[in-house]
Every structure is written in structure tokens, then in C-alpha cells.
Amino acid sequence: MTRILLVEDDDSLGFVVKDNLEQEGYEINLQTTGKAGQRAFQQNQYDIYILDVMLPEMDGFTLAEYIRSTGSDVPIIFLTAKSLKEDRIKGLKLGADDYLTKPFSIEELVLRIEAILKRTGKKSNQQPIAIHTLGKYTFDTKNLKLIFEEKIQDLTHRESDLLEFLVQHKNETLSRDKILIAIWGDDDYFKGRSLDVFITRLRKYISQDPSVKLTNVHGVGFRLEV
């Protein structure tokens, strides 16, 4: 089970985040001050640290700096009410892996956690299915192959990751941001252009079965219709 140290001084937000992440299968240690977070760090090992920036006793930046000074490279996500570019840059310079501005959705936080776990090679709490049936296609995620009758389309890792995410949410409209965060880890403009390229490729790959469509939802994102 993925263990997360959550340091958040807002009791209501801390409870909501802890409760929702535990429902997703994560083990959460919630602390409400920077010093308490520091003690928790010293006493146990974690897979991810989620730190509020504005904390009593020791702010999140100082806590992150302390964590990195010990040689720990465990991923850090900052939570902040500030959207200032300077704060984001400061956090990233301290070795943060991601940065969420309040208010944020739990769904987005979970996606960012999953993206970090995937990027760092750690196991997520979701057990992947190796073989998917997609209309008349067989999608083999382990071997990166999309099979239609006797024709085999080899996929790149990114193509496979994107198709797998779409399959997991088939017949559901997915926003561009949600896809980008899940597959690329963030939603900047250039990664958005890459997404369009990969969507075009996947449309071509699944074009032989009319019962399977990758639809553009104008102004929102995409939907894999099966």
C-alpha cells in the first residue's frame, strides 16, 4: 500500500483529503503542523509527501528543504492558497514534484499522485488489467500490441498508456486537462499539442472497427465510444 504523509493545518480540508485518499486505497498519516510533519518524517518512511505551504511552527517550504537535506528523493506535492509564479518556482527549486493551488478537486490530486507513482516506477494502488477487449480489437498492454483479427499494431509506451487510460474510462467524456495530468503529469501547452498527435494516431489504429470511435468533444476533450 502506498504510504503518504499529509501535512495540512486546515482541519476540514485535511479530513476531506485524508478520507478520500484512504477510500482510494492509500495509507495516510495526517499532521497539522510543520514540526509534527518533520517528526513523522523522521519516524517513518513514506512514498509521497503532500505539504501545505502555510503551516504553523514550520512552513511547508522549510519542511521540504529539511526533507531534501537528508538525501531523501521521495516525491513532494505542495498545496497552497497562493497562485504566485514566484512561489511555484521556489517550490520546484526545493525539489517539489508537483504543485496544486487551492481549491482543487480530489480527483485531480489522485491523478497527480498516480502520475508521480508511474513516473517514479512505484506501484500505484490500481492493479492494471493486461488484456482489454475493445470492440473487435484485443489490446495487450503488457506487450504493447493492438490486435485486429490477424493484424497486429505495435504501440509505443505513450500510445499504450493513453489508450489504456481511455479504455478505463470508455464511453466517458474526459477533459484534456485530466488526460494530460494522468499521462504526461501536467497540462502545459506543448504537452497539449503532443496529445493531439497521439489522439490522431489512435484514431487511425482503431479505424477498422466502426463500433469503436474516438470522438472529439468540442471545448472539453475526448470520449472513447464502444
Image (cartoon, rainbow, N blue to C red):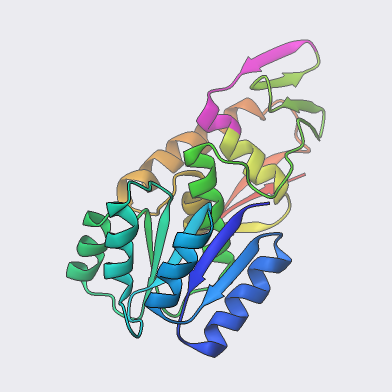
Check residue 151 for magenta coloring.
Answer: yes
Q: Nearer the viewer, residue 78 or 210?
A: 78
Q: Residues in magenta?
A: 150-160
Q: Nearer the viewer, residue 223 or 189?
A: 189
The quadrant where residue 87 appears: bottom left
**Residue at the spot x=63%, y=47% of the render?**
124
Position of residue 205 measured from the top left corner of the image (x, y, whole percent): 62, 26
Q: Is residue 148 magenta?
A: no
Is 45 left or right of 192, judged from the image as shown? right
Residue 130 sits above or below residue 216 on the image: above
Residue found 28% across the figure and 68% down from its top: 61
Q: Is residue 153 visible?
A: yes
Tell me, yes or no, if residue 217 can be seen here: no
Q: Is residue 32 above or below residue 118?
A: below
Q: Percent from the top left, x then y, of residue 133?
A: 82, 33
Q: Quadrant location of residue 25?
A: bottom right
Q: Position of residue 127 (x, y in %)?
A: 74, 42
